[in-house]
Image (cartoon, helix red, strand yellow):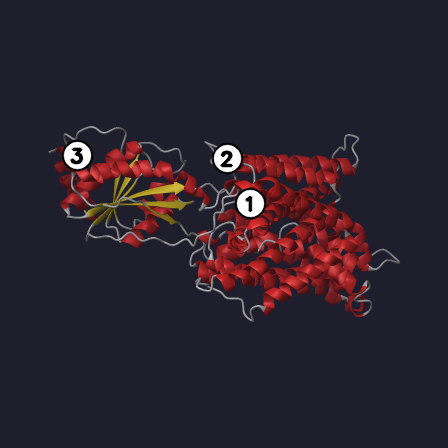
Amino acid sequence: MSDEHAVTLSRDLGLFDVTMIGVGAMIGAGIFVLTGVAAGAAGPALVLAFLLNGIIASLTAMAYAELGSAFPEAGGGYLWVKEALGGTMGFLGGWMSWFAHAVAGSLYALAFGRFATELYLMAGMPDFGLSPEQLKLGFMTFIVIAFTYLNYRGASETGTVGNIVTITKVIILGLFCGFGLVAMFQHPEGWTTRFTEGFLPNGWTGVLVAMGLTFIAFEGYEIIAQSGEEIKDPKRNLPRATFISIGIVVLIYMLVAFVAIGAITPPEGMRTYQFLGEKGEVAIVEAASQVMPFGAIILLISALASTMSALIATTYSSSRVSFAMGRDLNLPKIFARVHPVRHTPYWAVILSGVLIGTMAWSLPIEDVAAAADLMFLFLFIQVNVSVMRLRLRRPDLERGFMTPFFPVIPIIAILAMTALAIFLYTFSPIGWYVAIGWIAAGMLLYWGYFARVEEMEKPKEILMEEVLVSKDYSVLVPVATEGQAHILGRIGAVLAKQRDGEVLALNVARVPPQLSLSEGRIFLREGREALEKVIEEARQFEVPVHTMIRLGRDVAMAIRKTVAENASDFIVLGWPGYTNTAGKAFGSVIDDIVNNPPADIAVVRYRKYRPLRAVLVPVAGGPNSQLAVQVATRMAKLAE
């Protein structure tokens, strides 16, 4: 019998799911909010700015793909920087990542406020004597509080819902581009001169400013790496999903910029890019109102959905980073506290929400965007330095993807992002001051306190630990509680004893979406107690028993994977005699498994253990009845 419980993680995300995660994260609010401002800076060369940003993002994506395939754990850039650089730089990686995601959330909250105000006033609703700016701040404050509360409760988009939202955003942007292209090619004489004359009205400086400003619109592909431990075949699918998602997004962004500049008619005496720049964050809505029926309303609704999904994602990301830092003692321990009922890092969520709201109230949207861009640029520079450092320090690591032309590509990425950061100063000095102030405050805190209490927790490669089955016949007994384990463990032991087999006791620790699977290890203690009870029952019958704890989101899928990996012959499932799930006979877990069973199954109604006196077997013929009689015969042995 095993004295230690094998711990494994459930990998549930395929290539399509992961690609949609990347596309959905990148096509957030950035393309809706920043197109107008960036067009004002770059002019028609905004199309070129998006292309160049896509190339730079691809260079850094190679670093993420290499490190993500080598360290398929949640945490991404923060943990890699800690592993590669350690010390002050490791702390700053997390400190900047937390602030970057929080300030990105501030940008999306401000954008939501502006879009909601536009739609509210467009609908003719009363303004209660408030100015549009006051309405914007009111909507912004409401959405920050609401989504902080949702993350506190542990709410999150499921994979299916997330895919639907992403596909919907792509379709709406596709409609905008489609109508715009039709309008342009019906009147080619109107738009061609916009791209052939005065393509660079503000020179390359304007292009670089636009690139720096819109770089946040490409932020999101790194979430693929942060989901590494949940990806099927991560060494293959993680790099592929990263590059496919960037390619899709670059194409969409270039088409949006092309149509926004080429398809609309500006006021007399004003060039198109100047008109878009004047409209600012609602420029894309104005463009849509000219090129497609009900364009303004459709784009406003899409923009609201995008800002909401982006805000809940950034609130989630910022709280996850601060939770990890609190766990590593790089932030006060309060950040690492997990709610006893909701199983969410509630203080990390609340304090991240406060940071998001504070930044949104303190700065104009352009400066918020610049500060967020700078933080992500600095973080991505650190990641590129880390990939070079780890290639030298850890050449033995198995990498599913290796950055080509090493170290030329990371160096080019570092130089390019440094240039973008420098040129952002010409657009928003305030954004630079905020970024430098945050970094300086972090360094003072680290040197003054956290450096003395830091406990380095290096990321470890997560391996699928296989339980070696020593018998030809294996009975899988999934258990959740000690009371359940007492009854199911005894029945499983009897069934295994009759076939000279063994028991594989399984506990699935359901990890809430607010925590990564690695962070879900805090729930292991509960599962161990139930497994120990199964071991006790098996010992009474001298039946070999192995134990396993799986961390996962989907209990039924985790059970199925355990059956497949260990070639289990029989499953004993526990049922309390009722279900709280509407439309389910036994509940979502048992119904899912019974509808397509991976092995023979017995569903046991349990409450408390009572000695068996008789076993009634209703039969109607067929293989199920034969199996029921066989199980009943073995159960009768338990009564002897």
Which residue position is annotated with label 2?
337
C-alpha separation, residue under disc 2 versus residue under disc 1: 13 Å
Q: Secondary structure at mark 3?
A: loop
Q: Amino acid at mark 2?
A: Arg
> Which numbered dot is residue 145?
none
Left-right relation of 550 to 102 = left
Which residue lies at the image location 81% right of the left edge and 68% below the top edge? 193
Going from the N terminus, do you reach mark 2 or mark 1 first?
1
> Which residue extends farthest right?
269
> Which numbered dot is residue 616?
3
Q: Position of residue 269 (x, y in %)?
A: 89, 58
Q: Nearer the viewer, residue 412 or 197?
A: 412
Q: Is residue 360 above or below residue 428?
A: above
Circle 2: is it few (<14), some (14-19), or many (20+) Cα within 10 Å? some
Quadrant position of residue 231: bottom left
Q: Position of residue 71 (x, y in %)?
A: 47, 56
Going from the N terminus, do you reach mark 3 or mark 2 first?
2
Q: Nearer the viewer, residue 388 or 516?
A: 388
Quadrant position of residue 146: top right
Q: Amino acid at mark 3?
A: Leu
Q: Position of residue 19 (x, y in %)?
A: 52, 57
Circle 1: is it few (<14), some (14-19), or many (20+) Cα within 10 Å? many
**Which of label 3 and label 1 is nearer to you?**
1
Which residue position is annotated with label 1?
321
Going from the N terminus, do you reach mark 3 or mark 1 first?
1
Q: Secondary structure at mark 2?
A: loop
Q: Secondary structure at mark 1?
A: helix
C-alpha separation, residue under disc 3 versus residue under disc 2: 50 Å
In this rendering, does residue 43 appear at all?
Answer: no
Q: Is residue 308 above or below residue 14?
A: above
